[in-house]
Image (cartoon, rainbow, N blue to C red):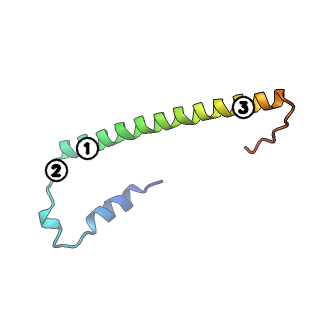
């Protein structure tokens, strides 16, 4: 898990010569940036969950068929 204090510290610990060239964001722009990032990450997480579910379904189907063919499968969960 990412600690937001560490993130802020990492972002603010740049050399002083780099800081004046950095554009500043208004509070509203920063809020929008973080909201957009969260929306993107939520969507990516949801797609990852769907992929894991499809993978699990396929694995279950293969294990079921192997058992029907007489092959015993040890579960590694």
Contact between labelled residues 1 and 2, with CB atoms less than 8 Å apart: yes
29 to 21, vertically: above or below: above
Contact between labelled residues 1 and 3, with CB atoms less than 8 Å apart: no
- Residue 9: horizontal and vertical position, in percent? 32, 64
To which residue does mark 3 refer? Answer: 62
- Residue 16: horizontal and vertical position, in percent? 18, 73
20 to 1, vertically: above or below: below
Q: Residue at x 39, y 41 (%)?
A: 41
**Comparing labels 3 and 1, the label whose residue is closer to the camera:** 3
To which residue does mark 2 refer? Answer: 25
To which residue does mark 1 refer? Answer: 33
Q: Nearer the viewer, residue 72 or 22?
A: 72
The quadrant of the picture occupied by the C terminus is top right
Circle 3 residues within 10 Å: few <14, some 14–19, many ≥20:
few
Q: Specify the farthest residue to the front.
A: 69
Side (left or right) of 35 relative to 1 = left
Cα distance between the residues tagged 2 and 1: 10 Å
Dot 1 falls on a residue whose secondary structure is helix
């Amino acid at each position: 898990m990412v600690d937001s204090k560490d993130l802020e510290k990492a972002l603010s610990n740049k050399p002083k010569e780099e800081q004046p060239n950095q554009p500043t964001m208004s509070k509203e722009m920063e809020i929008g940036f973080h909201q957009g990032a969260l929306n993107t990450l939520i969507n990516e997480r949801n797609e990852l969950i769907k992929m894991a579910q499809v993978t699990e379904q396929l694995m279950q189907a293969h294990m079921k068929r192997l058992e029907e063919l007489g092959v015993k499968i040890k579960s590694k969960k």
